[in-house]
């Protein structure tokens, strides 16, 4: 039985990999159609065509869509349901270089790799015959195939199956998660329509070694979250020949970079598991032309992982960091200025700068207090202009709104405005507080103890790669949501999250993924033995126990 399932998953993995489905291309539509077609051929969905349908991404220029397949067990009345998700898009293939035409043909690619220059580890894996290479095979066509094959096998004996499954094969996970974000409201609708009692959300995205030589296979209960703390930096312009008259925004921006980038002080911790430290994704000044004038404004933002802190806490932390960086810079500038004055024989006076950091919400209050309705009107007009411009993405939209707001302010002195750029991925911390959380932790712990520890399977708390798992819930703490809404320009207009539905869904999450290496690299590869022979059993048993 296990052998047959493994075979099925192998074939399906190769088939789905062969359909190129790079995020942001029409290939995402092709793969959704293929997944739908495979389900349609299954006996169960021929008898129940109403249980299989597409969920379109609203207003998507490419017409992308996700596939929803619903299985209703017939053993006895049981409204319990598990939500299963898997993403069907992949990252691009240009990293394969000359081998790009073979990126989605695992068997041919392995032949080509034999003549390629590879690191020792990759070569060893290639020659072992225990790995399949190819774009998306590991992230995550294999995981999608696993869920599809389990669904097929369950539906072959639908009278013997108790409980319900709702499987969403989602698009755009590697991009803006528009697939999952359009599926969440659909899950809520289904819950009301069918009376489903959702138990958990299970994903089968990849799981990789955590360090070189790590052979542990991880099952993750919960997931890391992500915020993008951003800073609009306003200095004071000066002529290059008279720099102490001004405050270079690049200098200030770099001071913030130096303080926050890669600083473990800002890493978030829960249950003894830490996130990676913040890393910069953008830093630039906003001066258009060349001239010997120091740039007045600039901006920078960071990728910031969370395990426990909400948006309000992260904002407080990074604002304190920016303030510290600003103050240190002012102190240092004063020292340098004193040295310069002495060396030049001119009188020294203290520089006029004060370290000031405001949040977007604080700036908004000040500007509205000063300018009243007129300020709101300017912001509204600017918002509509930006929304109409297809070249403005969510990050740039947020920046332009901060800039517009700051330009309305009569205060022209140096200041740092802290805000959030989209996207936002809430972390899911499965503490074990609610009955559903307790049950999930217990079921997985028991399965590992009884059977899977011998396969080196271990449970951890936070899936470490940003994924759609984040959208299974949202913080219910009003101060967390307020901090986000008030400090992320474009929230609800340019950037829409179904927050209410996420809060209603409120599910603990688990990822049981195939094992492999180098996701998002051209050496992406799937280890066959664990992925095909062990994972499917673990996924299946987890589902069945959760439905009991
Ligand atoms: Zn993935």
Image (cartoon, rainbow, N blue to C red):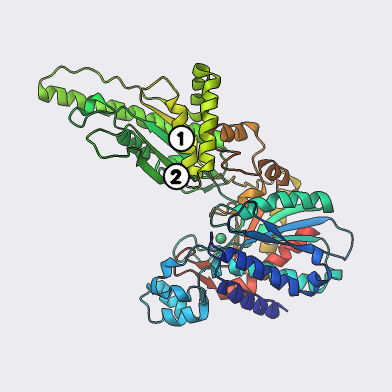
Q: Secondary structure at mark 2?
A: loop
Rendered location of residue 466, percent (x, y): 54, 52
Is 233 located above or below residue 173 in the figure?
above
The N terminus is located in which quarter?
A: bottom right
Is 214 located above or below residue 421 in the figure?
below
First in sequence: mark 1 or mark 2? 2
Rendered location of residue 63, percent (x, y): 62, 59
Q: Say which quarter of the image contains residue 127.
A: bottom left
Residue annotated with mark 1: 318
Is 397 located above or below residue 466 in the figure?
above
Rendered location of residue 268, percent (x, y): 51, 43
Q: Residue furthest right?
A: 76
Asked if labels 2 and 1 touch by Cβ distance under 8 angstroms, the answer is yes
Disc 1 from disc 2: Cα separation: 10 Å
Ligand 1 lies under 8 Å from the Cβ of mark 2: no
Is 128 located above or below residue 56 in the figure?
below
Q: Secondary structure at mark 1?
A: helix
Seen in the image, is 234 located left or right of residue 488?
A: left
Image quadrant of ligand 1 equals bottom right
Front-most of 506 and 12? 12
Residue annotated with mark 2: 278
Q: Residue at x 69, y 50 (%)?
A: 184
Q: Residue at x 61, y 64 (%)?
A: 29
For the question of whether residue 488 can be seen, the reply is no
For the question of whether residue 522 can be seen, the reply is yes
Q: Badge 1, how many Cα within 10 Å: few under 14, some, many 20+?
A: many
């Amino acid at each position: 039985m296990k052998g047959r399932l493994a075979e099925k998953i192998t074939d399906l993995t190769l088939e789905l990999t062969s359909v190129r489905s790079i995020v942001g291309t029409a290939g995402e539509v092709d793969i959704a159609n293929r997944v739908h077609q495979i389900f349609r051929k299954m006996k169960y969905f021929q008898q129940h065509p109403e249980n299989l349908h597409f969920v379109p991404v609203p207003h998507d220029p490419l017409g992308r869509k996700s596939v929803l397949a619903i299985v209703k067990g017939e053993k006895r009345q049981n409204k319990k349901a598990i939500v299963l998700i898997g993403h069907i898009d992949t990252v691009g293939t240009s990293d394969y270089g000359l081998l790009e035409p073979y990126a989605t043909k695992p068997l041919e690619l392995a032949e080509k790799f034999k003549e390629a220059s590879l690191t020792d580890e990759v070569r060893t894996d290639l020659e072992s015959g225990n790995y399949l290479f190819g774009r998306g095979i590991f992230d995550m066509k294999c995981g999608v195939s696993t869920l599809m094959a389990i669904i097929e096998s369950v539906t072959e004996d639908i009278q013997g199956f108790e409980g319900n499954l709702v499987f969403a094969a989602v698009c755009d996970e590697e991009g803006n998660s528009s697939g999952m974000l359009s599926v969440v409201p659909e899950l809520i609708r289904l819950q009301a329509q069918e009376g489903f009692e959702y138990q958990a959300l299970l994903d089968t995205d990849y799981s990789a070694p955590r360090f070189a030589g790590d052979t542990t296979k991880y099952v993750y209960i919960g997931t890391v979250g992500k915020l993008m703390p951003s800073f609009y930096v306003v200095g004071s312009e000066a002529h290059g020949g008279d720099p102490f008259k001004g405050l270079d925004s690049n200098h200030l921006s770099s001071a913030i970079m130096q303080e926050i980038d890669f600083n473990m002080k800002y890493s978030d911790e829960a249950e003894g598991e830490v996130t990676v430290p913040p890393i910069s994704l953008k830093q630039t000044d906003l001066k258009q032309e060349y001239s010997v004038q120091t740039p007045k404004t600039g901006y920078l933002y960071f990728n910031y992982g969370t395990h426990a802190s909400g948006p309000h806490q992260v904002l407080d932390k990074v604002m304190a960091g920016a303030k510290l960086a600003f103050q240190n810079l002012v102190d240092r500038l004063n020292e340098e200025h004193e040295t310069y004055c002495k060396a030049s024989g001119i009188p020294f006076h203290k520089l006029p700068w004060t370290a000031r950091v405001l949040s977007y919400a604080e700036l908004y209050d000040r500007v509205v207090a000063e300018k009243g309705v007129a300020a709101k009107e300017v912001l509204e007009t600017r918002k509509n202009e930006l929304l109409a411009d297809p070249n403005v993405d969510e990050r740039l939209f947020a920046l332009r709104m901060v800039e517009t707001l700051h330009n309305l302010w009569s205060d022209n002195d140096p200041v740092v405005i802290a805000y959030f750029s989209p996207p936002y991925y809430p972390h899911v911390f499965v503490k074990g507080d609610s009955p559903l959380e307790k049950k999930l932790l217990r079921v997985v712990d028991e399965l590992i103890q009884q059977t899977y520890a011998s396969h080196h399977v271990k449970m951890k708390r936070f899936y470490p790669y940003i994924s759609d798992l984040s959208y299974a819930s949202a913080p219910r703490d009003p101060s967390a949501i307020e901090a986000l809404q008030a400090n992320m320009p474009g929230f609800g207009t340019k950037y829409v999250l179904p927050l209410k539905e996420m809060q209603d869904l409120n599910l603990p999450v688990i990822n049981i993924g195939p094992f492999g290496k180098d996701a998002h690299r051209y050496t992406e590869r799937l280890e066959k033995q664990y992925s095909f022979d062990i994972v499917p059993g673990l996924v299946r048993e987890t589902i069945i126990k959760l439905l009991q």
